[in-house]
Amino acid sequence: MEPPAISLFAPPYHTLDAVPDLGALHGGWSGLPGISVLWSLEAGDWGRCFEQVRKRPGGVALVVMLPRAEDVAQDREVLRVVEQCRPQSILPSHPEASPSDLRSLLCRTPEDLAIAVTDYLAWRGVVLDGDTRRLVRRTIDLAGEIRSVTALARSLYVSRRALGRRFLTKGLPVPSHWLHFGRVLRAVLRLPSSEDTLFSIACDLGYPDGFALSNQMQMQRLTGIRPTAARECLGWEWVVEMWLRKEAEEGGFCPNSRPARKSDTQELPPQTRAERGWRSQADRKPIS
């Protein structure tokens, strides 16, 4: 029996479920954090599946299973198709995907977490100029070891005020939120993939205890994620998505970061434009 072209892989990650239409996920993905999609290029109509997969909801990780090697050699278009869909992982051809293999893939931390995050932001329509992108990447890089915005600014060789002004004028969340988010993201990545306690992870990241990480302005308030959910959900894209939505609700993003252009929004997933909820600069309020 030929495997389905598109399958859903969701907590508790025991089985793969065929999905006839990914569009059905757009209305209810937020109730299923940690979901991922497997696209088998051996099966189905590439054209129909390509559009569904490319326009999948934010926060849904994609794993692509390639067709047989001889098919790839004969049709190099497959490589371009895969690249445009921005997969989290790519698997070689196999008769049937193993849930255990997929769990291992989703548990992996990206080789360069900062680049992975900024690439995801670009895919979701958060446009950053080169200098700002470098600042964001450096902030995410340093989040695992830097404990304050003052120390962050010193590491970036700018004043704290200048750093804050750069993010503010670009319509982005304040530097402290990027710094805290980088720490929370690292914590969420560790929770399901290790036997470490929340307390030990929190202490490794500079928090006094697990409560400080989970509730005091951090995991729960910054992203809306509870440690129990983080233990059960694999991957990292859903974490970034929940943070983006939380920041948008709180006014952390504003439309003054760049002029709106039709070309900027043509290729975005439909819900990106409809659900951003960006406020004007006057309405912008940081999370207290």
Image (cartoon, rainbow, N blue to C red):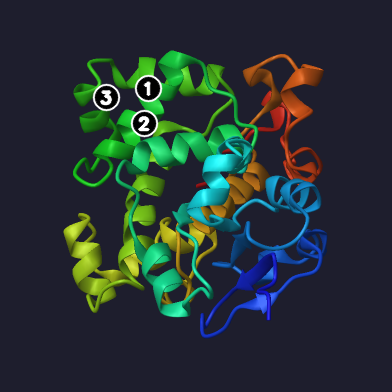
Front-most of 273 and 36?
36
Q: Which residue is mark 3?
A: 153
| Marks 3 and 1, the one that precedes in the sequence | 1
Secondary structure found at label 1: helix
Count of numbered circles on the image: 3
> Pointer 3: residues within 10 angstroms few (<14), some, or many (20+)?
many
Q: Residue at x 63, y 56 (%)?
A: 41
Quadrant of the image occupied by residue 235: bottom left
Q: In the rendered structure, are the residues bearing label 3 and label 1 in contact, judged by CB atoms less than 8 Å apart? A: no
Secondary structure found at label 3: helix
> Pointer 1: residues within 10 angstroms few (<14), some, or many (20+)?
some
Task: Tell us which disc is closer to us: 3 or 2.
Answer: 2
User: Real-space Cα distance between discs 3 and 1?
Assistant: 13 Å
User: Real-space Cα distance between discs 3 and 2?
Assistant: 13 Å
Q: In the rendered structure, are the residues bearing label 1 and label 2 in contact, judged by CB atoms less than 8 Å apart? A: yes
Vertical placement of residue 267 versus 169, above or below: below
Amino acid under label 2?
Arg
Q: Classify residue 84 as left or right of residue 52.
A: left
Q: Residue at x 25, y 21 (%)?
A: 156
User: Real-space Cα distance between discs 1 and 2?
Assistant: 5 Å
Q: Which residue is mark 2?
A: 137
Q: In the rendered structure, are the residues bearing label 3 and label 2 in contact, judged by CB atoms less than 8 Å apart? A: no
Secondary structure found at label 2: helix
Front-most of 113 and 156?
113
Q: Which residue is mark 1?
A: 134
Front-most of 56 and 258?
56
> Pointer 2: residues within 10 angstroms few (<14), some, or many (20+)?
many
Task: Tell us which disc is closer to us: 3 or 1.
Answer: 1
Vertical placement of residue 31 versus 51, above or below: below
Amino acid under label 1?
Arg
Vertical placement of residue 150 versus 74, above or below: above
